[in-house]
Image: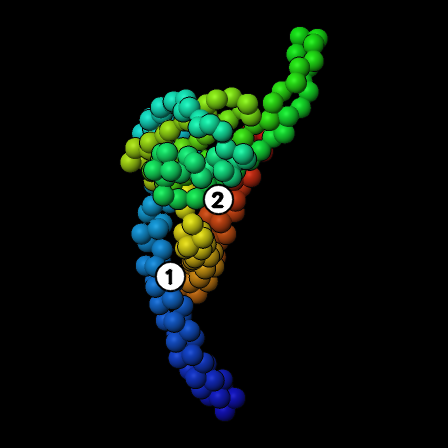
Amino acid sequence: MVQTQSRDTTFSRQPKRFHWLKWLRRMHAWVGLWGAALGLLFGVSGILLNHRMVMKIPAAHMEQSQVELALPEPPPADAKALAEWLQVQLNIGREPHKISTEPAKTVTWGGQSFRQPGQWKIDFHNPQHSVNAEYWVGNTYVSIRHQDANAFAFITRLHKGVGMGTGWVLLADTLAGGLVFLSLTGLLLWTKLHGSRLAMAGLGLGSLGLMVFFVLDSL
């Protein structure tokens, strides 16, 4: 009689377990579909970024040009005014990504002290182009460096979020959160759908061990 009740309890629990696994697999699939396109973009750009120094992949390239632009009379009063003037002169339809100023200071060079003028730096960025302006207070010109990204550099700049707004950052955050979810649900599905706990532990610990080894080896 006790054995019969135990079997009935086991059979009554099985549908709930299968329903939970079915829901878990469905959520795993939908989250994976949501991040498929972004995952491809970040995967390709991640490979390019990962190998740019060691293997020196020349795919990502920035075409650079530089020019010195004469300032009007009187020159812009501050860095913000200079940024607004550059937007008009260079036909830049976006706000500066960064404006930095450094006040005048005394520097020592060759045993002598010199008065170094203040410096203004203004950067405009989008994924395809960069404009960097540098101005030493008192000069009659501002130095402009312009960079154009090729297709691969464009992808890597998207990966790093260069020139992108808050919307792109939040969208990339959903991919990061999705990867965490996929990792956890994948682990749960493995433990529930596959019987070899030893294989699971071996794969997980092997990956973790390699990560720790390469990090320590680079220190």
The residue depicted at 40 percent of the width and 68 percent of the height is 24
**Identity, as a three-letter code, of the amino acid under mark 1:** Val
The residue depicted at 39 percent of the width and 76 percent of the height is 19
Marks 2 and 1, the one that precedes in the sequence: 1
Residue 217 in sight from this viewpoint: no
Residue 147 in which image quadrant: top left
Whether tag 2 and tag 1 are in contact, CB under 8 A, the answer is no
Q: Secondary structure at mark 2?
A: helix
Residue 67 in which image quadrant: top left
Q: Label 2 to label 1, Cα distance in Å? A: 23 Å
Q: Secondary structure at mark 1?
A: helix
Question: Which residue, as the protein is rendered here, is positioned at the far left?
Answer: 151
Residue 85 - label: none
Give the residue number, with chain letter if any, for mark 1: 31
Question: Taking 199 as reference, is 24 above or below it?
Answer: below
Residue 105: % across, % down: 67, 24
Question: Taking 178 as reference, is 127 above or below it?
Answer: above
Give the residue number, with chain letter if any, for mark 2: 207
Q: Nearer the viewer, residue 125 or 36?
A: 125
Residue 73: % across, % down: 46, 27
Label 1 environment density (alpha carbons within 10 Å; few <14, some 14–19, many ≥20): some
The residue depicted at 39 percent of the width and 44 percent of the height is 94
**Identity, as a three-letter code, of the amino acid under mark 2:** Ser
